[in-house]
Image (cartoon, rainbow, N blue to C red):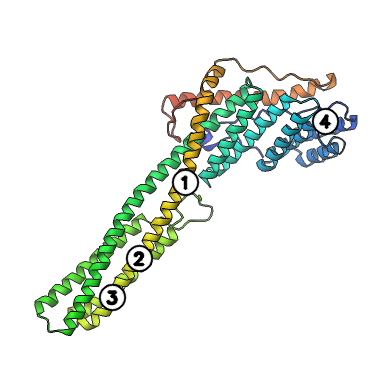
């Protein structure tokens, strides 16, 4: 399974995973035959057959980086990027630790690891932005390792650009979300202040009813108490409506984990305020009938529910503050890493973009395998050309500010 585009088809990633058609010198010819069979099956998208052939070849060459790398391609084509990444990393290590290190294959493996992290970052964009950021950071790090080995590899350079751009875009989105959360927190703090005043007013109204029940009270005082309770009830309703307007709806299955996780706590607060309103409504008729002794316990009950709502609101705010602090620390670390990455790579990237496309990788395959290798190269090279053309188009769109799906990102690369 091959994902062909990211959100809104803005970018296409150059896979450039060319089948490795040789194994280490000295390996039995049967392993070479099985490797070719696996490659044929892979190009025909017969993935089970490919894995079976590679597995049999691995019995004779268990540490062959070529075999391990090609197994990674099988998993990648099927969309299992975790399994593919593990294979590519293992192949890169094997290439580096070989008796005669294969630095070209090692660089290709690091590039493939970066592609796997990139695809995982794409998948996580709609489910978990923070994990998506981690994946893109890992993708860039893998591309950088590949460029340390092969600084002129144009495919790696081009693949690195959308990874960095998407990382910046997601970081900006997380920053905007954090700003909105901070604004919401300020509003909640104001609501908490109003709720505390409201609870105190309701407690004072209950005390007045208790005093009126114990001593003779003129009608003017009863009328004042009745109007005061009506005002408290109206303010309670208004405050509950404000809080409900700020409350996120309950999370639906599959909803992003980055959405506010406090909807349950908010519902508890609203429930307390609703019970306070019900007690206030029940207290009003006795007050209107000049029966404060009957109204007083209901008023106390309403005050208690308001206090309960206030306590839960404070707990909710504390949890949100802790979460924002944790997110802020993580984002600060990621921004520092991206800033450092920008400083280290900016001049190199600009100079590399002005150069022509890197030459095709040198092939040391036996003469009989050259033609088969060329077929694989042509497929990936054509795909890379399409991707580079798409990237040029996307760059023109960004420069013209006609990008509908993404916010402009500073081009510091």
Whole-percent x, y for residue 250 in the image: 45, 58
The quadrant holding residue 107 is: top right
Residue at point 41% right, 45% down? Answer: 178
**Mark linked to residue 309:** 2
Count residues near mark 2 (Cα–Cα under 10 Å), then give few for <14, some for 14-19, many for 20+: many
Whole-percent x, y for residue 7 in the image: 52, 37
Distance Cα–Cα, label 3 vs label 4: 84 Å
Whole-percent x, y for residue 33 in the image: 87, 31
Q: Is residue 290 visible?
A: no
Q: Decide which of tag 2 and tag 3 comes sooner along the chain.
A: 3
Question: What kind of element bears circle 1?
Answer: helix
Distance Cα–Cα, label 1 vs label 2: 27 Å
Distance Cα–Cα, label 1 vs label 3: 41 Å
Distance Cα–Cα, label 2 vs label 3: 14 Å
**Marks 1,2: beta carbons within 8 A:** no
Residue 393 vertical position relative to residue 115 in the rendered view, above or below: above
**Marks 4,2: beta carbons within 8 A:** no
Residue bearing mark 3? 300
Distance Cα–Cα, label 4 vs label 2: 70 Å
- Could you tell me how many numbered marks the image carries? 4
Residue at point 75% right, 21% down? Answer: 374
State left or right for residue 251 relative to residue 243.
right
Front one among 332 and 284: 332
Q: Decide which of tag 1 and tag 3 comes sooner along the chain.
A: 3
Residue bearing mark 4? 36
Question: What kind of element bears circle 3?
Answer: helix
Residue bearing mark 1? 327
Count residues near mark 1 (Cα–Cα under 10 Å), then give few for <14, some for 14-19, many for 20+: some
Whole-percent x, y for residue 222 in the image: 14, 77
The quadrant holding residue 224 is: bottom left
Question: What kind of element bears circle 4?
Answer: helix
State left or right for residue 158 relative to residue 272.
right
């Amino acid at each position: 399974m091959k994902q062909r585009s990211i959100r809104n088809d803005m970018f296409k990633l150059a896979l450039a995973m060319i089948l490795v058609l040789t194994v280490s010198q000295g390996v039995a010819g049967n392993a070479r035959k099985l490797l070719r069979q696996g490659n044929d099956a892979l190009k025909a998208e017969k993935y089970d057959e490919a894995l079976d052939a590679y597995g049999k070849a691995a019995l004779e060459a268990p540490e062959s980086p070529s075999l391990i790398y090609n197994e990674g391609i099988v998993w990648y084509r099927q969309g299992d990027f975790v399994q593919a990444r593990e294979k590519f990393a293992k192949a890169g290590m094997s290439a580096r630790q070989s008796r005669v290190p294969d630095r070209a294959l090692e660089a290709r493996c690091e590039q493939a690891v970066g592609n796997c992290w990139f695809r995982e970052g794409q998948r996580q964009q709609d489910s978990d932005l923070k994990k998506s950021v981690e994946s893109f950071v890992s993708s860039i790090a893998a591309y950088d390792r590949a460029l340390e080995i092969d600084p002129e590899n144009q495919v790696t350079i081009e693949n690195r650009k959308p990874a960095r751009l998407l990382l910046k875009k997601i970081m900006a989105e997380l920053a905007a979300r954090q700003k909105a959360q901070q604004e919401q927190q300020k509003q909640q703090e104001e609501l908490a202040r109003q709720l505390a005043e409201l609870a105190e007013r309701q407690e004072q109204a209950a005390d007045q009813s208790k005093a009126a029940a114990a001593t003779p009270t003129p009608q003017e005082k009863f009328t004042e108490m009745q109007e005061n309770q009506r005002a408290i009830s109206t303010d309670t309703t208004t405050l509950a409506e404000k809080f409900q307007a700020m409350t996120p709806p309950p999370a639906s299955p599959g909803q992003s984990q980055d959405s506010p996780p406090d909807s349950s706590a908010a519902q508890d607060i609203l429930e307390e305020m609703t019970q306070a309103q019900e007690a206030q409504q029940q207290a009003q008729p006795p007050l209107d009938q000049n029966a404060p002794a009957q109204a007083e316990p209901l008023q106390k009950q309403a005050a208690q529910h308001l206090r309960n709502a206030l306590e839960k609101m404070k707990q909710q705010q504390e949890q949100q503050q802790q979460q924002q602090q944790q997110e802020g620390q993580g984002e600060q670390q990621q921004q520092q890493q991206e800033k450092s990455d920008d400083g280290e790579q900016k001049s190199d990237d600009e100079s590399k973009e002005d150069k022509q496309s890197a030459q095709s990788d040198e092939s040391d395959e036996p003469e009989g395998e050259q033609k088969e290798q060329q077929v694989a190269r042509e497929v990936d090279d054509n795909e890379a050309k399409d991707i580079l053309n798409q990237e040029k188009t996307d760059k023109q769109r960004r420069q013209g500010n006609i990008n509908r799906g993404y916010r402009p990102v500073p081009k510091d690369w």
